Image (cartoon, rainbow, N blue to C red):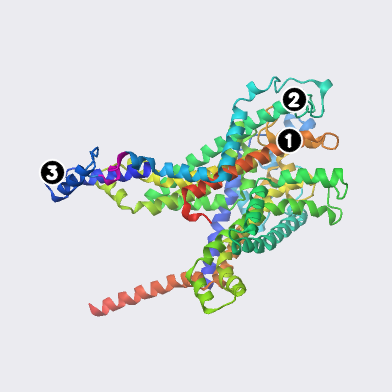
Amino acid sequence: MTDMKTKKSSHQGGHGHHDKNSPESKALKKTNGKHPGNNHPFDPERRHGKRRRKHSQWGDVWFRLRKNKLAVIGMVLASVLILLAVFAPILTPYSQETQDIQNQFQMPSWEHPLGTDNFGRDLLTRVLYGGRTSLLVAFMALMFSVFVAIILGAIAGYYGGMLEMVIMRMTDVIQSIPPVLLAVVVSAALGSGVWQTAIAVGIAGVAPNMRLIRGQILAVRGEEYVEAAVAIGSSNIAVMFKQILPNVLSPLIVSASMGIGGNITAISGLSFIGLGVRPPISEWGNIMTSGLEYIRRFWPMAVFPGIMIMLTLFAFNCFGDGLRDALDPKLKH
Amino acid sequence: MAKYILKRFLWMIPILLCVIIVVFTVMYFTPGDPAMAILGNSYTPESYEAKVRELGLDKPYIVQLGNYLINIVTKFDFGKSYMNNRSVTTQILERLQPTLIIGAVSVLLSQLIAIPVGITAATHHGKIQDYTVSSLCIILAAIPGFLLAVFLMLLFCLKLNWLPAAGITNWYGYILPIVCSIFGPLVSSCRMTRSSMLEVIRKDYIRTARAKGVSEHDVIHKHALKNALIPVLTMLGMHLGGAMGGSILVETIFTVPGLGILMKNAIYNLDYPVVEGCVIFVSFIMSLLMLLTDLAYAAVDPRVRDQITGGGKKKRRKKAAQSMEGIAA
């Protein structure tokens, strides 16, 4: 949809002030008669009104995505996990902080479906709240990396020159530090907490996303509709956001949906070694760490958060894979 | 060619210097007072002053950074640990062995498994082998190394009592850490081999080879493989860097005395020189490996070689054209 829109606006920009009696418009008027309801003589895309809209780009993507079973499974599972996280306070009668030392280390039962932890807190409640933190931080990290990547990538790809040189060399530098170590160091520097962890994890994602955006912009920049937009005097910002960005969007969406899984891994990994999000805020990684201390006599505390991490990764990976195939069917093998 | 290699090596120097600056700067602005952490209970204002001066923490940022850079560049000296006053370089070298063994063995093994499996999946595209490999990849991709480590430890060390849960007193201790680090690179290489093989198999030159009557085995292993493996092997450096970085988790779980644990403890103790040393050291190794894979390609692949020397040719041609113009004028 967006893709078509951008092309449309540039077409109109190019031919907007046509002479009404030119042969071209006459020819168009003829076909106009055959298709009642077409009031856009210069825009062949809109000629078939409703039928066209059904097959919009995103409509096609949605159609292909629905046909892919694995992607649908991933999508449903991911939505369930997100809903569980959002409605955690409603779903459980327990509070995540109330301690009950007498009932610690209970095995799963009807009252406590996943058992209780080392302070006698309901483990299911902790895991649900943990999912809240993990998913929230993962999305925040994603937002951060995409936002920074769009700005830097747009500057590098669109303006070029010295700025591009500096930005590209900086990403070279950042990318020669292994991503896990980068996240560990930044997390150590920022301290523990929700947004600190989001930034630490997000920074590692900036460089690859930025390269992606820059590459796409370089590929699109020479296209005619961009030239047309520049020719009618659109400002740089307008060209960038209205003409170029919609075309960069689909690879970016794929990279983002694939990135969620990696972010979840990184966040729980950081919390697992004591950086990232620390107790009393529950997070899958830090529940596992405290569970690891008691693993010899009580396994549920280390295992259930782990299973949740696996389910989340599975869901988002399947969805991301499906989305990639749906957005670019040519790449599908 | 020699010029290209030299150029690439020279390019590495400013990038590595920048890595040092970035890591130092991040650690410099880390909250927490190392001098306080060292003194602990024996804190008095005078001893604190003395400690700060001893560690050089009273100097401005730019001086500290300058000293740090100069020491690394001239003496390969990463400073001394705040905690035990031992040289960071020797500590890293002491701890390097287990991390390097786990990293190298797991990356090598993962490639040895991933490439044949990926080829099989690609040559049996759409058949049962392909589906098995793809679904296994999807499942394995959902299990991060540290989760696998926890589960395997629970199973093999605590329930079955087959393997030691902690430490590496003999080679048994290496088994689980290596197994846990294999799957990350395995899944990514396997997928990449499969998709790049599928892409190459559709190329015209493969059809030509088949039309000539070359056996299917030779088509795959002699004609297609060389091109299909390029993207897979380019990732080797990344994988080893990732394995060494990821060691911080696996080593924590199995208490392997490697770089990861050294770094983790250093972060807790605010022992910044050790943290900086470890990160910079691993980044050096990773950059070097990535450069070496690039150079290996330039040496083996005639297309890449042409691209490099082609630039030279173009320049020469330009010069020739200019001189021709000169003559014409």
Which residue is under mark 1? A304
Residue at the farthest right position:
B161
Between the residue at mark 2 and the residue at mark 3, the CA separation in whole angstroms equals 75 Å
Helix, strand or loop status at disc 3 = loop
Between the residue at mark 2 and the residue at mark 1, the CA separation in whole angstroms equals 12 Å
Q: Chain of mark 1?
A: A
Between the residue at mark 1 and the residue at mark 3, the CA separation in whole angstroms equals 71 Å
User: CB of mark 1 within 8 Å of CB of mark 3?
Assistant: no
Q: Which mark is residue A20?
A: 3
Which residue is under mark 2? A122
Residue B43 in the image: above or below residue A225: above
* Image point (47%, 42%), residue name: A62
Helix, strand or loop status at disc 1 = helix
Q: Chain of mark 3?
A: A
Range of residues picked out in magenta: A43-49
User: CB of mark 2 within 8 Å of CB of mark 3?
Assistant: no
